[in-house]
Amino acid sequence: MPNLFHESEFVFNVLYEAVSEGVIVVDENQIIVAANSAAEKMFGYVKGELYEQHLNILIPPNVHKAHSMKGGHYDTFYKQSSARQMGINKDLSGVRKNGNTFPIEVGLNPFELHSKKFVMSILIDITNRKKSEDKIIELNAKLEEKISTRTIELHKTVSDLKGEIDKRVKAESKLKRALKKEKELNELKTKFLSLVSHEFKTPLSGILNASVLIGKYTTSEMQSKRDKHLLTIKNKVYYLNGILNDFLSIERLESGKVKYKLTNFKLSKVVNEVVYNANMLLKSGQRINYPLNIDDLTIYQDEKIIELVLSNLLNNAIKYSPENTTIDFKIKLKSNQYIFEIQDQGIGIPFEDQKHIFERYFRAENALTNEGTGIGLNIVKGHLESLGGSIEFISVKDKGTTFTVKLPLIKSQ
């Protein structure tokens, strides 16, 4: 036993050799002054061979500097002098006599003897544990691969289902059967199927009822009543068409199949079309303030996407605003970008829901009773970002919402 412990050599021998973990004691110069058999065996040395060796003999060369330099790992610990686990959140390695490295876990315990400071290190070879962890990581990777495969299968199933939607009642039945068969798949598909079933059934029922009522008005003086139900049918079909376009947009955005067609066109052309369609959805007493001074504005962008964005925002403003309110629609060219602003006097978006408003399928707490799929704003944001634009909003519950869209001014090619 080294001279350090000659007064209690027997006691220290018993203590050191009684533990299965490796025990190494170093002085303030990082010189090894004691090591038990478990530590010597762990690092491949014979009894007594580690005595008076520098601690660096057990540490990988690439970390010698960081460990031994002034202000380094050892110096910092030595000055703090408190027991702790070494290398938390880091992988530590030891070096055997033959040069092979292996993973270890180290506990450090400072103590004083004969007015000198020493550090006792408790060492555990965690090779088997690391192998087990690596095996778990490998299994997790395989699980992720399986999940990815199932997700691809899900997208294919969803695409097939879209082609069947136009068969109305038959499509609904197919969707329900598909939901039952595929319920073990992820939450995204479950939400998709549920939304398609609900959002198509309600308008289709309205169309059916209006069609039946039209048949009862057979005389010419009942034309106004027929017109009323024809308008209902038209609005429901317009709504269904919007849902279909939304679902198609999602699929194209996710698959990267969107091919934007940029052309020069007058903004007034798109605005007229959007406002005309929106007027058919207005509630009693609602009105839209048409944007001013846009007759001479020409933009180089994808016309269909601009129409989709403005229609979505304007229709939402109508849907979530009460009767006898005004919707302000403004367009201006500023700082090499077009700015579109749609402001309503509607129900607003609760503050706690605002951070989720662009998430797919999310619907604010105060909007759950209104028709909607919760995907429109998600699609709008996706298209705008792809075109180099942005969308933001300011909203106060029960007072209204203002959406602002910004698109860069692009010169035609």
Image (cartoon, rainbow, N blue to C red):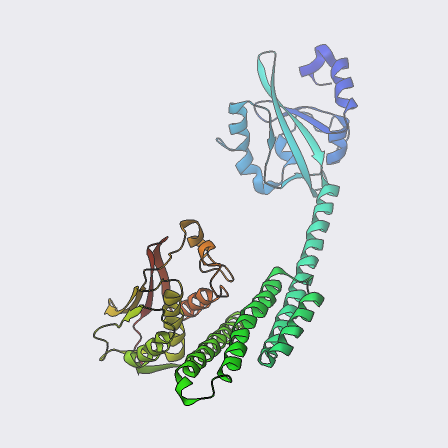
- Looking at this rendering, what residue extends furthest in the left direction? 293
- Looking at this rendering, what residue extends furthest in the bottom direction? 220
Residue 222 placement: quadrant: bottom left
Location of residue 211 in the rendering, given as x and y in whole percent from the top left corner: 51, 81
Location of residue 349 in the rendering, given as x and y in whole percent from the top left corner: 40, 55
Residue located at (51% from left, 85% from top): 215
Counting every numbered tag in the picture gives 0
Work out which quarter of the rendered image holds the N terminus and state it. Answer: top right
Residue 194 placement: quadrant: bottom right
Location of residue 63 in the rendering, given as x and y in whole percent from the top left corner: 57, 40
Location of residue 292 in the rendering, given as x and y in whole percent from the top left corner: 22, 73
Which of 138/154 is in front?
154
Work out which quarter of the rendered image holds the C terminus and state it. Answer: bottom left
248 relative position to 294: left or right = right
Residue located at (41% from left, 74% from top): 308
52 relative position to 278: left or right = right
Q: Is residue 92 above or below residue 391?
A: above
Residue 225 placement: quadrant: bottom left
Which of 131/157 is in front?
157
Residue 413 in view of the camera: no
96 relative position to 115: left or right = right
Which of 378/91 is in front?
378
82 relative position to 4: left or right = left
Q: Is residue 413 above or below residue 397?
A: below
Residue 410 in view of the camera: yes
